[in-house]
Image: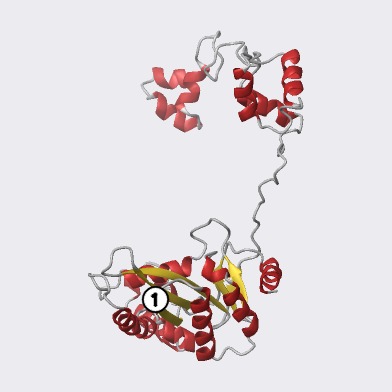
Amino acid sequence: MLDVAVDSGARLFKACEVIGLSIRSVQRYRLPDEVEPDGRKAGAIGRIPTNKISDKERTEVLAIANMVKFANLPPSQIVPALADEGRYVASESTFYRVLRSEDQLAHRGRSKAPAAHSCTEPLEAVRPNQLWSWDITYLQTTVKGLFFYLYMILDVYSRKIVGWEVYEEESATYAAKTALKAYLREGIGSKGLILHSDNGSPMKGSTMLAMLQTLGIMPSFSRPSISNDNPYSEALFKTVKYDVDFPEQPFETIEETRVWVAKFVPWYNEEHHHSALKFVTPGQRHRGEDIEILTKRELVYETAKTLHPERWAGTCRNWKRPEVVTLKNVRNVKELEKTMLEKIA
């Protein structure tokens, strides 16, 4: 049929489109008989690799890996040791492959195998003062190598800064004072607050943990050696340091630093329209005022669409209030509670 169409003056690819075939498939079908339709020469499929080790060599690999002097070593150390003896039995990857097939590729040393740090279910906040996040950042001074340290506690649900302090050093004692002030200022009581942080020494110091235990606050920590498990505090510090009013020159005194932060916090809480909150301020969301604000915005857009429907190709802008805020990749809270109690004791 294709030949008839082409002889009548049709283009081959057009004829293929009519009958639902790819022109490349037709070209492969017309290859010489000695070539398979997929382009490989006949007989190539099923050929035994020339570099495959024999059964005897496979047995030797297993015997060597289980020798007393190699029993606690991985193939990455066995192969160089054999080379030092002037022997080549198989490549490192072959050793790994053979051991894996025999279910012997396990931790072979006396030390404990690396622990897999499993994550629990993500922490969720559905109201203010349910989940806080905090961290410490450096603020440059006019003295090279000397820094002031900004402690900030953020409500994850509302993004409101609920506590901050500036000190001349990192300390679990200062961290405990900052947490206590925020706790009293917000009137937490017995609401079951969780405080998330990274694994720094001020965060896990006994003074800080004892304070949290006294206040009934459950600590939560990022996974070990993971730098980006505290995203809300990291994002806040970026907002701090990229603020248009952030001093271009380093701070001279700690009093000057505290004055600047004291101006920044009210602006952030009450004037900064947060993109993750549908552009309401953290203070408005913290107090629940965002419900009315977003409802009014939605009504404005619906009215505008009714007046000029031709200007909308689809639905109106989404002004729906984010009801749940999630913090992922946290360590097991119950295990942390047990560790905290042991450390305090």
Residue 269 vertical placement versus 30 (above, below): below
Foreground pick, 149 / 40: 149
Q: In this view, does 277 lie to the left or right of 95?
A: left
Residue 166 appears at what percent x and percent y?
A: 39, 78
Residue 209 appears at what percent x and percent y?
A: 61, 75
Q: Residue at 59%, 11% (x, y): give it.
A: 42
Residue 267 appears at what percent x and percent y?
A: 33, 83
Quarter where residue 41 is shown = top right
Disc 1 element: loop
Q: Is residue 90 left or right of residue 34?
A: right
Residue 177 vertical placement versus 111 (above, below): below
Quarter where residue 14 is shown = top left
Q: How crowded is mark 1: few (under 14 residues within 10 Å), some or many (20 or more)?
A: some
Foreground pick, 270 / 219: 219
Identify the residue position indicated by label 1 in the image.
274
Can residue 273 be seen here? The reply is yes
Q: In this view, does 111 lie to the left or right of 148?
A: right
Foreground pick, 172 / 54: 172
Q: Which amino acid does label 1 sit on?
A: His
Q: Residue at 66%, 63% (x, y): give it.
A: 120
Q: Residue at 60%, 18% (x, y): give it.
A: 83
Q: Residue at 43%, 85% (x, y): give it.
A: 283
Residue at the limit of the structure toward the top, as seen here: 34
Can residue 295 be seen here? The reply is no
Quarter where residue 53 is shown = top right
